[in-house]
Amino acid sequence: MKINHHEESGIVIIAPKGKIMGGPESTALHDLLHDLIEQKKTSVIIDLAKVDWMNSTGLGLLISGLTTLRKAGGELKLANVTDKIQSLLTITKLVTVFKSFDSIDEAVKSF
């Protein structure tokens, strides 16, 4: 998994690419979220358009990020959720926990 990020209208957009399966990449995403919180950047969108698959560790990482950002007074939203990941979110009932949007623009406007 590769992780790119940029800022748009004061909102940080994180765009992972590949599989979110744990390991060193998950540590990198975790560290990035904590760095953003230290910088007082707590409005975050994770763009899942280029994520091929996610396992339970990846879901745990998203939940951890959401919880951490909310505790810091922020929010984490999802954009461009693929059919495979949408199915995973539905099966695990996490579809009720995360706010998902069809595009980054829609997610940005929701803040």
Image (tube, rainbow, N blue to C red):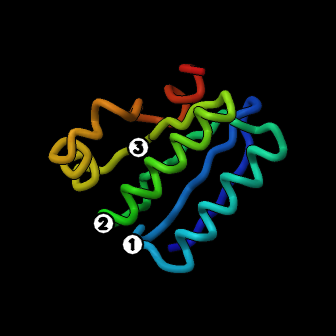
How far apart are the two marked residues, 2 and 3, measured between alpha carbons? 18 Å
Q: Are marks 2 and 3 in contact (CB under 8 Å)?
A: no
Which image quarter: residue 70? Answer: top right
Which image quarter: residue 55? Answer: bottom left
Q: Is residue 62 left or right of residue 87?
A: right
How far apart are the two marked residues, 1 and 3, measured between alpha carbons? 19 Å
Q: Are marks 2 and 1 in contact (CB under 8 Å)?
A: yes
Against 58, residue 85 (above or below) is: above
- The residue tagged 2 is 55
Which image quarter: residue 19? Answer: bottom left
Circle 3: element type:
loop
Between disc 1 and disc 3, whose residue precedes? 1
- The residue tagged 1 is 21
- The residue tagged 3 is 80
Q: Amino acid at mark 1?
A: Met
The quadrant of the rendering that contains the C terminus is top right
